[in-house]
Each structure stands twice: as C-alpha cells, then as structure tokens.
Image (cartoon, rainbow, N blue to C red):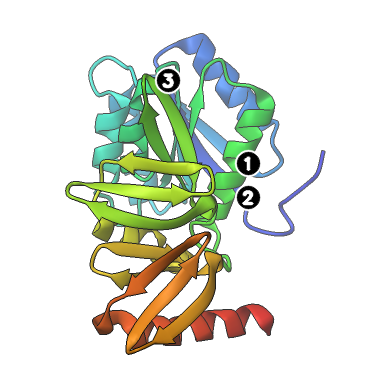
Amino acid sequence: MLSYGSVVDMLRVLAVDDEVPALEELAYLLRQDDRIEHVTTAADGVAALQDMVQMIGGGERLDGVFLDIRMPGLDGLDLARLVGGFPSPPRLVFVTAHEECAVQAFDLEAVDYLLKPVRAERLSEAVRRLEAATSPGPEPGQDDVIPVELGGRTRFVPQQAVWFAEAKGDYVRLHTVDGSYLVRMSLAALERRWSEAGFIRIHRSTLVSARHVSELRFEGGRVTLTVGTETLPVSRRHSRQVREQLVRQHRGVMS
C-alpha cells in the first residue's frame, strides 16, 4: 500500500452512522487507508456532536467527518449545519443510501457525497478529496462539483468543466461544453465559492472561468471575452480588473 504520511499530515476523522454494521464497515475501510491516522466512531448525531465538541475543545485535530444522513434524533444534515458554526469546522463527507439529499449536502459545502453500499475505491477517492480540501494547494476548490437535478436524477457538474455562469433570478445557469444546467443558488455565492479557483466576475450577471478564456478583445470602446465557443461582453465597470486579472493569471501559468 502506498504511504502518504511523508507528504502531508495524516488525517484524523470521525465516522457517524446509526446502523452498526454500516458503521463498522466504514470504519474498517477508513483504517485500511494509509492517509488516515485515526478513526473515531459515533452511533448517532448527538453522540457525534458531543465527541466533536470534546475533541475540538480539547485541542485535538479533527480533519473530516464521514456522516450518514438519515439518523434518529439529530440527522446528518442538521448535524452538518451545527458543525458549520464551529470556529474551524472539520470537512464533511456524506455517506448515505439517499441520493435525493445531494443538493442540500453540497449547499453545506460537503467535500464528497457517497452512496451506500460504499465501494473501497470510491471511498479512497473521497479520502483524496478530503486530503486536498484540508491541505493548502495551488488551486483551491479544484475538485468542487455542483449537483444538478435532472428529471429525478442528480448530475454532478465539475467546476473545471464550467466555462461561465449566468445569474437567472434566484438561479445560476452553468455553461459547459456538454450543455447548460440550472442550479438554485446565487451568483454571489458561487463567486465566493470559486473565486480562488480562477473564476472572474465580468458583469453583474456573469462569472467566467479564466482557464477557458481564449481571447480578450477591445473594439469600439467595448470589451469582450471568448470563453469556450461563446463571446461575452465585459461591463465597463469590470473591464480593467478583468484585464489585469487575466494577464496576471496567465503570466503565472507560463512562469
């Protein structure tokens, strides 16, 4: 087995599930991963919350929580909302049999969303995402995905596939090479979430990915960007900032 301990600090995690066999299996799989230093378990949301308060209050490091959703008393989503109020909250990975909760989970900034029964290779990928989320890197949020509901199915749109995003009232339309997807969230929230990954506001209603910008054009006092196969206008208010940010970012890529 490949050891990761010499590269970054190993992870300390909490596994939470009210079904004992599922909890034992999850804990067993996590302990087989060389990136995991320590696994604590809790059989319900209340016990998990108590454990987290005790650990964090006692100065212990807790990097991530692998969390079931449907639990009696305090369910996983409610627990996640409480955890979000901690000064330095651990990152969340949901592990559930209910795929319909994916949108709520990612609204709570989950690192990943696994469906039961959990496969070892899929759990390994979740650990990799947790490791990336807890370690400073050159491209924060590079593995972020947005869940999109499509006729009873949930499609996960990766951040790197998005050319640009448009505000549509209470929604945002994500444009990719494969098509466009409507997501219920604000453009301002998406900008906060993806700004460090190279997404730039070019208009009050448009956010673009710098990695997909192929041309910046000045014509008759107007500024436009070519993003993927689309040409988008840059507002006068944003034009100078956009130009400087694009030049700065692409110089960084070439250096």
52 sits left or right of 120 in the view: left
Looking at the rendered image, the quarter that the N terminus falls into is top right
Q: Can residue 153 be seen in this view?
A: yes
Question: Is 140 left or right of 168, judged from the image as shown?
Answer: right
Cα separation, mark 3 vs mark 2, equals: 23 Å
Q: In which quarter of the image is residue 189?
A: bottom left
Q: Position of residue 75 (x, y in %)?
A: 28, 23
| Residue that numbered label 2 is attached to | 10
Image vertical order of residue 16 relative to residue 7, above or below: above
Q: Residue at 29%, 30% (x, y): give it.
A: 77
Residue 177 x/y as whole percent = 54, 48
Counting other residues with Cα less than 10 Å from the Cα at mark 2, is it few (<14), some (14-19), or many (20 or more)? some
Q: Give the vertical position of 154 relative to 229 (above or below).
A: above
Q: Is mark 2 on a helix, strand or loop?
A: loop
Question: Which residue: 27% across, 14% down?
Answer: 72
Residue at the image point whose x is 34% and y is 26% from the top: 101
Residue type pointed to by label 3: Asp
Q: What residue type is labelled 2?
A: Met
Q: In which quarter of the image is the C terminus?
A: bottom right
For disc 3, the marked residue is 17
Q: Position of residue 116 (x, y in %)?
A: 52, 17
Label disc, if present, on residue 153 of the rendered structure:
none
| Circle 3/circle 1 CB separation < 8 Å | no
Q: Earlier in the sequence, mark 3 or mark 2?
A: 2
Count the marks.
3
Would you place residue 244 above or below residue 50 in this image? below
Q: In this view, does 201 lie above or below 92?
A: below
Mark 1 highlights which residue? 36
| Image quarter of residue 65 | top left
